[in-house]
Every structure is written in C-alpha cells, then in structure tokens.
Image (cartoon, rainbow, N blue to C red):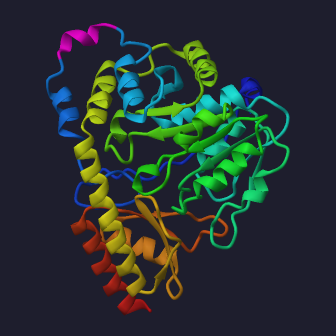
Amino acid sequence: MAAWEENVRKVIPYIPGEQPVRTDIIKLNTNENPYPPSPKALEILQNIDGRILRKYPDPEAKELVQELAGYYSVNPEQIFVGVGSDDVLAMSFLTFFNGRKPILFPDITYSFYDVWADLYRIPYERQPLDDKFEIRTEDYKKECGGIVLPNPNAPTGVEKRLMELEEIIAANRDVIVIIDEAYIDFGGESAVRLLPRYDNLLVVQTFSKSRSLAGMRIGYAFGNEKLIKYLNDAKYSFNSYTMNTVTTAMGAAAVRDDVYFRETIDKIISTREWTKKELIRLGFAFPDSKSNFIFASHAKCPASKMFEALKAHGIYVRYFDKPRINNYLRITIGTDQEMKSLIEFLEQFLGENV
C-alpha cells in the first residue's frame, strides 16, 4: 500500500441498480416511473433560452421552493432542496448525526444508509424487521443518536402506519428523526402533517419516482425553520449552486401540473394491484406493497434462478443476494403491457421449471 493511502477515507460504496445500455428490454429494476414527466415540465426543457445558462442558478431554488410550499401548505422556510433525495439524506446525516450514540435504522432497508454512516464515521445499529418485514415500534424507543425510517420501506414496500411513526417520533424528542418518503405517493400517508407538533422531525421526498424526473435529480425535505437553516448552512459550506436552472424550472412546472401527477399515480397503483393478483395466481408471496414495486418470492423456484432467466429474456428486475432476502425479487411496476409481458414469461418459465 502506498504511503498516501493511509490518509484515504475508505468506504464500501452503494451499488445502484443496473442501467443497461440496451433499449430492447423491459426495465423493472430501479423503481423508475414508466411514464414520461409532466408535459408542462417537458415544455420548459424544449423552450429553454440558452442565454440563461451562462449565469449561475438561483442558489435557493426559490421558484421550486415556492411551488412546493404552496402545494404542501408549509412555509418556504420549512423546505430544503437538493440534487435528488440521496443528496438531501446525505446532507442530513452529515448535519444532524454527530453524537457518540448510534443512530438506528432497519436491517432490511435502503442500503445507502449504512454507506453514509460509514462515510461520516457515524455509529449505527440495524434494528431487525419482524417475520412480516415490518418495523417494530418498540425497537426505536431507546437511547440513540438519531433515527432513519423509510416509509414505505424499500425494498419491501411495507408501510408503517402514521400513528406508529408518531409514537417513535414522540419517544425521541432529543434527537432528529428522519422519515424517508421516496415512495409515499403510491398509497402511504405522509408524515408532513406531523411537522407542526415535532421540531425534531425531518421528512424527505423525491421527484424521481412519482413525478418521473429521476434523470433531473430533485429531492427535498420538510422540517421546522431551524432544522432547514442548519441544513442550508451545511449545504452552502460545500456548494451554493447545487441545483441547476433547468432542473429548478422543470420541477416547479411538474408541481403545478397536479392533474397529470394524479393520473400517473392512479395508473401505477391500478397496474400494481393487477400485478399482485397475477403473481398470487402464479404462486408468489409478498408483503402488501404501498410503493411502485412488489417484493416477491416463490416457494418452489429460487429467486436467483428467476432473476437470471428474466434477464436473459430481456426483463430486468432487482435481486439482492443478502441474508433474509436472497429469495426475493424486487419488481418495479411498469406499464400494463410491460407487466403483462412479465407475467406471461413467468407463467411459461414456472410451468417448465416447477
């Protein structure tokens, strides 16, 4: 090892879902929205005046913040924006988790949480989900340095009821509780309504899933004014211009187009419920999903075998070779036709292999 490597901050990085170059596939592996963004957002992109790009963007992304504030009925000072919810969460870990006590999050969850904790040298403890992949409220009523709870959880899709989340928040008033709501628009109840009662609550959401703008990288958080100021102080200590001008304008336009947003969500939920019935018919089992994916296993066919067969057929899903979940496939909800193609292939494959 070279001498300079002794001073390198070494971490095991997060591994994102595969992004294949092929276009002749059905891509159900990264929980992207199968429908295009709002036409109003695309209109911004198509009519952008190139002259504005020579100037720095608004560091406060005020146009987007104002739209979000009006839509969610909060004050602009209660909103923090970043380059995707990953950026928002990473900045939140850096800002709020600086004690010696471990932060708490589930053992089966978004695998970026322990990466950020390792990167920032934050002690942490994983709390095991129960046999139904549900978060146990009692596990989060103990001394800690902070809490991170995804709701609905990923990769399981299981939602924790808001009254149970509030019980956890109320029991931890001395630390920050982060509720990661990347999938909340697909059927869950948001913790945003709890903000007036808890100054230790931070709720994080994203445009990547329900608003079809994963490629533009827009994330945001809600909290009381003091929490948001602390986040902005940390952000501006790194880079004042994190969100570009085009992204800000497209995000604001997407928020304004609520009719299209609702229509898209309804289509995905409808397709999800149809897919659940079809998977049950084929012998799959899964926790009830409130997200835009289903976390499914088959009692007679290993998930790894199905994963490879699907991929060879041009259907990409997500497989995690990890304890407790190595016999599950996470299947993103695509269009009706994409899900029908998935079911048709699985029906044929299982008929030949089970």
In the image, what residue occupies the spot 38% across and 47% down?
Answer: 209
Figure check: 107 above or below 114: below
Image coordinates for residue 296, horizontal then vertical, percent: 49, 73
Image quarter where the C terminus lies is: bottom left
Q: Is residue 111 left or right of residue 123?
A: left
**Residue 266 falls in which quadrant of the image?**
bottom left
Q: Is residue 258 left or right of residue 185?
A: left
From this view, report whether residue 148 is shown above or below residue 71: below
Residue 250 picture quarter:
top left
* Spot occupied by residue 176 in the image (x, y as percentages of width and height): 70, 35
Relative side of 258 to 194, left or right: left
| Position of the N terminus by quadrant | top right
- Along the line of sight, the residue nearer the viewer: 64 or 225: 225
Magenta residues (range): 49-55
Q: Is residue 163 left or right of residue 67?
A: right
Dividing the picture into quadrants, the one containing residue 124 is top right
Q: Is residue 177 above or below residue 279?
A: above
| Residue for point 51% across, 61% down | 157
Residue sticking out furthest to the front: 197
Q: Position of residue 143 (x, y in %)?
A: 85, 44
How would you classify the magenta stretch by its main secondary structure?
helix
Q: Is residue 294 magenta?
A: no
| Residue 155 spot, x, y in % from top left | 53, 59
Q: Residue at left 32%, top 51%? A: 33
Q: Is residue 12 visible?
A: no
Q: Nearer the viewer, residue 113 or 174?
A: 174
Q: Residue 7: in sight, yes or no? A: yes
Number of numbered markers: 0
